[in-house]
Image (cartoon, coloured by chain):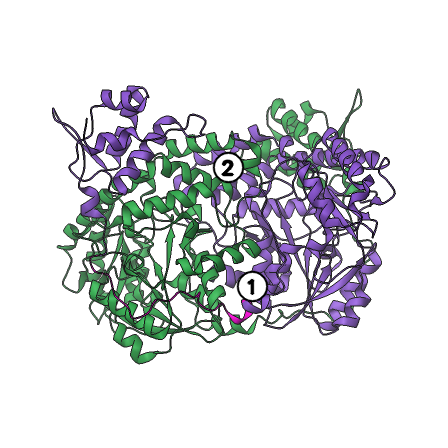
Chain colours: A green, B purple
Amino acid sequence: MKNAAGALLSSIKLDRQSRKSISVQLYMALRDTILSGGLKAGDRLPATRTLAKEIGVSRTTVIDAIERLTADGMLVSRVGSGTYVSDTLDRQRPTARITRSSDETINHAPALSGTLRHAQKSYAKRKWLPHTTKPFVTAMPALDAFPMATWTRIYARHLRGNRNDVMGYGQPQGHEGLRSAIATHLNAVRGITCDPAQVFITSGAQHAFSLIGQMLLNAGDRVWMENPGASGARNALLSAGAELVPIAVDRSGLVVKDGLAKAPDFQLAFITPSHQQPLGYVMSLERRFELLEAVEQARALIIEDDYDGEFYFGNAPQPALRSIDSQGQVIYVGTFSKSLFPSLRLGFILAPERMVSAFNELFESWVGGPPTATQAVVADFMDEGHFATHIRMMRRLYKARYDALIRAATRLPDTVQIQETSGGFHTWARLDSRFDVDSLVKQARSRGVVLAPLGRYCLAPMEENGFVIGFGSASPDEIERGMEILGSLVADGALAA
Amino acid sequence: MKNAAGALLSSIKLDRQSRKSISVQLYMALRDTILSGGLKAGDRLPATRTLAKEIGVSRTTVIDAIERLTADGMLVSRVGSGTYVSDTLDRQRPTARITRSSDETINHAPALSGTLRHAQKSYAKRKWLPHTTKPFVTAMPALDAFPMATWTRIYARHLRGNRNDVMGYGQPQGHEGLRSAIATHLNAVRGITCDPAQVFITSGAQHAFSLIGQMLLNAGDRVWMENPGASGARNALLSAGAELVPIAVDRSGLVVKDGLAKAPDFQLAFITPSHQQPLGYVMSLERRFELLEAVEQARALIIEDDYDGEFYFGNAPQPALRSIDSQGQVIYVGTFSKSLFPSLRLGFILAPERMVSAFNELFESWVGGPPTATQAVVADFMDEGHFATHIRMMRRLYKARYDALIRAATRLPDTVQIQETSGGFHTWARLDSRFDVDSLVKQARSRGVVLAPLGRYCLAPMEENGFVIGFGSASPDEIERGMEILGSLVADGALAA
């Protein structure tokens, strides 16, 4: 083996720390060598024994990789002669036999739609961070407390089911069992009475907001948006053509009077009444009725985003807007990102009765839902009671983590004040106006503490200075350590703006 | 147990044929009774022994159901006293304490957006049918030939992985490993060279068409659409505001001249060059260049829908439009619905280099991708070579099923002519113009044979009379039996219009 093939193969780099097995890495490396033309049709591979020695792996590993390449047609064995690169690739892979020559080269990107060009100007920046369970990451549930063994068992059982059900096309409106389970859950936990036919399954709440916006909004339609408010919903509604009007939020929730003053002709209001995103306030019953009244007058609609309403740990909870809405004005949106986990990308729309046929037509015509496996497994998880039990345990766990947060907060300097909340797993902290929150966020991050500046949620500037803190994914000990770091940073005068 | 509770409980109906266990059914029935107020807080449950006897199940089953209800907080046990309905529900479930009275009731549905109202008029009707492996269902791969054991093993391994990776938020653009695996696959099977950063993962091809349309189209933009053509793509593009222009298709593919005559000012062309949907023709190389030239002149773009390009079984395949496009005019869309299975709801966009930053911004701002599990499992399935092997085996299997179809077709009357194709798993049949295709479809269906009338794919009327037949999911024997039934129906004069 003194030819080009030998040289190439011996240059293969394997990473023994990788999650992928050495045999898979070798398969991928050999495949890439063939695909890039480093080994050509008809080239003979060195003997497995030689290869194993040159690459420094066991012969079994080499044989395994070669068998994979043979199975997928890249290599071919000839008895008594050895293993060769097959000509399958050359025969079956189409190649561009002619390339066009053109007078000019187009380099600029094509124009985006007018709606998106307009929307872009107001997008919230949503930097994706590799999520960890550091304090005080927001929107992250307690991953460590999830009953993964039960989940895996249900998954495996699902995959063993009837192949037509498991692998075929699902119902566009969503898996029937899941729609029923959600209707039952809404009744048990949120006091909402509805029919499964009103439930439409989406690829997360974000997808739901996009669909609702696309369905109802004309470019320039005015939409009330809580300020500060949910950044994902903001971007989705903007992309559907909404002209967002930032409305103030106080301890009783959305300030309806502010909305009426700024945009009495609104078409839609986006709202998080159970646990304001990001301030954590619960909308008062009076305000709820005030909002319903305003919406009725304007012949508008409401999106009620109930992203963590299951985790209320205060005294008597307020009824969902949806359950006091007698006029079919509320489109309720739920998600499993908080109640199960974010990577599921699973949410739902609960449509008012009078909108069910429109939703049915749209889903049947052009909306593909989430994978059947995701839906069927969640349905079984709910039907068998694991979901209700999990919610109940998590409500207690988040309450305990909240208590740890409040306890640790008593030792903070007066210049930072953690605000109370009564559910979910985030709240906000008011920071003395002399402090520069961005600089605090940066310094905290370098010490392993994640804070989200309030500004990230703002469509219009706010008077308050502060940041949002999550307490869902960190243990009470981690919360306490995080608060100590926060306290020492705030006590350090260097932060004053 | 002579009280209301006893009467209610004894009326519980259990279905021993159900996929759900008796214990789960009992849990669900008891929970529904409590939720609906049939059992109230403080009501005492009969002894497990009594319950088991009244309902006719084992005591273990009853205990299991009661334990689930206790775990999720619906029941509470008092030592030495029994099991009671807890007051948790009353305490934690919000109820509407006031209901609003309103002068009038709104019954009409709110107005849809102008774009959707316009789109609705041209939607293709897409009736969802519970998919089976009957002949000649279209768009359904050979579910029985899928290596489910390997798939399940990879799934279980994924779920055992690091919880932050498995459960946390995924990258909006898609799972990195999957984007790389797709880039390698496109090189190996389709001769397309690209960077993983150009690959954006979507919830199926349908979702990709919606996103591309929403991103690029203004209401009223003219879009070339193959006639007949893909009905899902048609509805997605219409919903994004497209004014679709039906363009003729012949044996060489889209008739570019027809497009230039009807809409020289087009913004976008939707096309299935590898295997025309639904006619099964392969676009000639000459036509491909003609189309690229026309698109360049008009400063337009192309969506290349390569939904089953992996399964070409003819002689030298044509290169993908994407691989002969030197100007970044082609947005290539792929799907795993045919190469793996439909319920995955997984597809991808391969963006031209000059559009990558726009796609990045949009995905980061408001597109949530498919579940991480789906993406990670497919990535491993590809990296370990199972995908390449599966594609290779399926190409052979579909060829064998196609051969069976053509063999059986020789015995059909002259009034129905199966058209040749060289890939994928569907083709079409020309029906003598004196026959009423809808009546044939109906009669065939009553005998277990599924046919799709050509009209279902038509945006504008076609001269041809015929139907589409799939040969992917039925065995050669089933195909032969199906053709016999088809032959006898066509031979029967009753069908003549």
Residue type indicated by callout 2: Ser
Between A382 and A44, the one lying in front of the other is A382
Please name the residue shown 63% across and 57% down the image.
B124
Chain assignment, label 2: A
State the image quarter where residue A340 is shown: top left
- In the image, which disc is placed on residue A18? 2
Q: The C terminus of chain A is located in which quarter?
A: bottom left
- In the image, which disc is placed on residue B357? 1
* Of labels 1 and 2, the one closer to you: 1
Please name the residue shown 17% across and 48% down the image.
A403
Q: Is residue A378 magenta?
A: no
Crowding at mark 1 (Cα within 10 Å: few <14, some 14-19, many 20+): some
Left or right of B425? Residue A231 is: left
Between A122 and B447, the one lying in front of the other is B447
Range of the magenta residues? B97-116
| Image height of A402 relative to B341, above or below | below
In the image, farthest residue toward the front: B494
Between A437 and A131, the one lying in front of the other is A131
State the image quarter where residue B165 is shown: top left
Crowding at mark 2 (Cα within 10 Å: few <14, some 14-19, many 20+): few
